[in-house]
Image (cartoon, coloured by chain):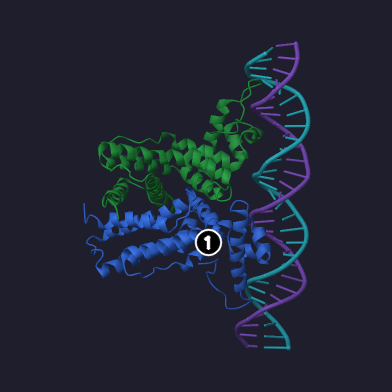
Chain colours: A blue, B green, C cyan, D purple
DNA sequence: GAGCTTTCGCTACGAGTCGTAGCGTAATGG
DNA sequence: CCATTACGCTACGACTCGTAGCGAAAGCTC
C-alpha cells in the first residue's frame, strides 16, 4: 500500500518504519498548514525530521505521498451494527462525514482526485487505498440487510453490481459535495434527512 | 464575474475584450494538455497570444483564472421543460453530466474546490460563478413541479430551504463522484436509475 | 567480530517557475 | 494634442524541483 517495496531485501540496513509514520503524519500537518498547492516535499521532510532525499527514495512524488497520507485517515471506517438498515447507514455516513470534516482530508482528497484525471496509476492507487475500502461497506450493509430480511435477495447479479455502484456514488458524492462544495457540516440532522430519502428511494418500489 | 473591474475607467485605452476570451479559452486548452498542477500562467499567456504581465494585471493568480475559465462551461445549463418532474430532472442531470464529461471541467473543477478549502474568497467566487447557477435549477424545478401538482406546496420555509440544499448536494455530488472518482460515464441508464431513486425518495412518503 | 549490503543525512547543483518592475509603444477620450 | 490607461517585451531575485555524490550508520551472514 505504501511506497515501492516490490522486493523487500533481506540484507542490508532495513528501512525505518518510524520514518514512514513520521513522514505521513508530517504530510498531513503540512497539508493543514499550507494546503495542497503550497505543500513542498522539502517542508514535509523538515517537519518529519528526515532528509529530503529519503522522501524521494520512498515516494515517486507529491501525489503518491498525499494519497498514502490521506488513505490512513480512512482506516477507522467500519460498518456499525445498529440493528436496522437505516441506523447502519446513518452510522457509516456519520463516520464518513467525520473523516471529511478534518482539514487534512479536505485539502488532500480533492487535490489528488483532480490530479488523477491525468494519471491512471494515481487513480488506481486512490481506488485501492481509499475508494474500495468505502465500497466494501456498501456491500456489507446490503448483505446484512438481506440477512435481516430488510432487502430482497438480488435476482440479477449485473443489476445488483450496478446498484451498489450507484448507492456508493450517491452516498460518498453527497457527503463530499455537502462538506467541500457547499462548505457546510454534514451534521446529524443532515445525515438523517439524507438517509431517509436514500432509503425510501431504495425500498419504496420493489421494481419499475 | 471576470477579472477585477471595480471601477471601469472612462479614460485611457480600454481593456481588450478579445484578450479575455482568448485567455479563458487558452486556459481550458492548457488545462486539458497539462492538467492543473503543471499548468503555468506562462503557458496560458503564450497560448493566448498575450504577454504574461497582461494576465497578472487581470487575475490575481492561477486559482481565480481557472475558476473563471471553468465557470464559462456552465453557461449552457438550463432547466428543460419535458412535461414531468422525472423527465425534467433526468434532462438537467444529463446536461450536468455532459459538462463534467469534458476534460477541462474535470481537471479544473476539483482542483479549485480543493484550493477553496484554504481560501474563503475563492470559495465565494466558485459559489457565485458555478454553484449558485446550478442551485437555481433546483429551485426552478421545484416551483414547476408544484405548479403541475407533482409536489405539494411547502409548509415550513426553513425546511424547504434545507430540502433544496439536500437535493442539490445529492444531485451534484452523485454526478461528480460517478464521473471523477469512480471514473465512469454518467450515461443515460445511470442517470435514469439515479433519478428514479431520488424521485422515489422525495415523493414516496409525505412526511416522517 | 569481520565484512557486505542497503539506508540515511547532508550538501550542492542545474533547470524551471514564480510574480514583479521597468520601459517604450499603442489605443482611447477630452 | 495631450493625459491616461493598457499592452508587449525583457530582465530579475527568489523559490522549488528532482538528482547526484559523499561519508556514516544499521542491519544480516559467516
Question: Is A92 placed above or below B114 here?
Answer: below
Of B36 and B148, nearer the camera is B148
Q: Residue at x 55, y 48 (%)?
A: B116
Of B194 and C1, nearer the camera is B194
Of B155 and A70, nearer the camera is B155
Question: In the picture, residue A19 is in which quadrant?
Answer: bottom right
Q: Of helix, strand and loop, which one carries label 1? A: helix
Residue marked by disc 1:
A70
Asked if one can make out residue B118 in the rendered structure from this viewpoint, the answer is yes
How many residues crowd around disc 1 within 10 Å: few (fewer than 14), some, or many (20 or more)?
many
Asked if one can make out residue B182 in the rendered structure from this viewpoint, the answer is no
Q: Which quadrant does the C terminus of chain B fall into?
A: bottom left
Marked residue chain, label 1? A
Q: Residue at x 51, y 44 (%)?
A: B108
Of B64 and A131, nearer the camera is B64
Q: How many marks?
A: 1
Q: Residue at x 22, y 54 (%)?
A: A205
User: Residue D14 in the image: x percent, y percent?
Assistant: 75, 48
Q: Residue at x 25, y 63 (%)?
A: A151
Question: In the picture, residue A176 is in which quadrant?
Answer: bottom left
User: Residue C7 in the image: x percent, y percent?
Assistant: 64, 71
Locate residue B202 relative to residue D16 in the image: left or right. Answer: left
Name, please, the residue furthest toward the front. Answer: B155
User: Residue C11 in the image: x percent, y percent?
Assistant: 77, 61
User: Residue A36 in the image: x percent, y percent?
Assistant: 58, 53
Amino acid at each position: 500500500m505504501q511506497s515501492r517495496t516490490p522486493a523487500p531485501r533481506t540484507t542490508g540496513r532495513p528501512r525505518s518504519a518510524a520514518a514512514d509514520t513520521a513522514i505521513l503524519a508530517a504530510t498531513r500537518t503540512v497539508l493543514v498548514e499550507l494546503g495542497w498547492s503550497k505543500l513542498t516535499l522539502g517542508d514535509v521532510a523538515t517537519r518529519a525530521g528526515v532528509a529530503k532525499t529519503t522522501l524521494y527514495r520512498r515516494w515517486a512524488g507529491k501525489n503518491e505521498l498525499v494519497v498514502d497520507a490521506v488513505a490512513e485517515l480512512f482506516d477507522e471506517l467500519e460498518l456499525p451494527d445498529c440493528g436496522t438498515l437505516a441506523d447502519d447507514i446513518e452510522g457509516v455516513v456519520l463516520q464518513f462525514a467525520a473523516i471529511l470534516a478534518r482539514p487534512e482530508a479536505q485539502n488532500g482528497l480533492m487535490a489528488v482526485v483532480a490530479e488523477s484525471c491525468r494519471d491512471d496509476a494515481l487513480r488506481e492507487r486512490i481506488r485501492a487505498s481509499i475508494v474500495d475500502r468505502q465500497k466494501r461497506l456498501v456491500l456489507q450493509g446490503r448483505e446484512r440487510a438481506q440477512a435481516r430480511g430488510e432487502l430482497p435477495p438480488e435476482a440479477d447479479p449485473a443489476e445488483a453490481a450496478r446498484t451498489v455502484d450507484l448507492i456508493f456514488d450517491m452516498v460518498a458524492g453527497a457527503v463530499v459535495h455537502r462538506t467541500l462544495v457547499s462548505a457546510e457540516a454534514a451534521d446529524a440532522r443532515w445525515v438523517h434527512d439524507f438517509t431517509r430519502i436514500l432509503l425510501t428511494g431504495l425500498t419504496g418500489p420493489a421494481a419499475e
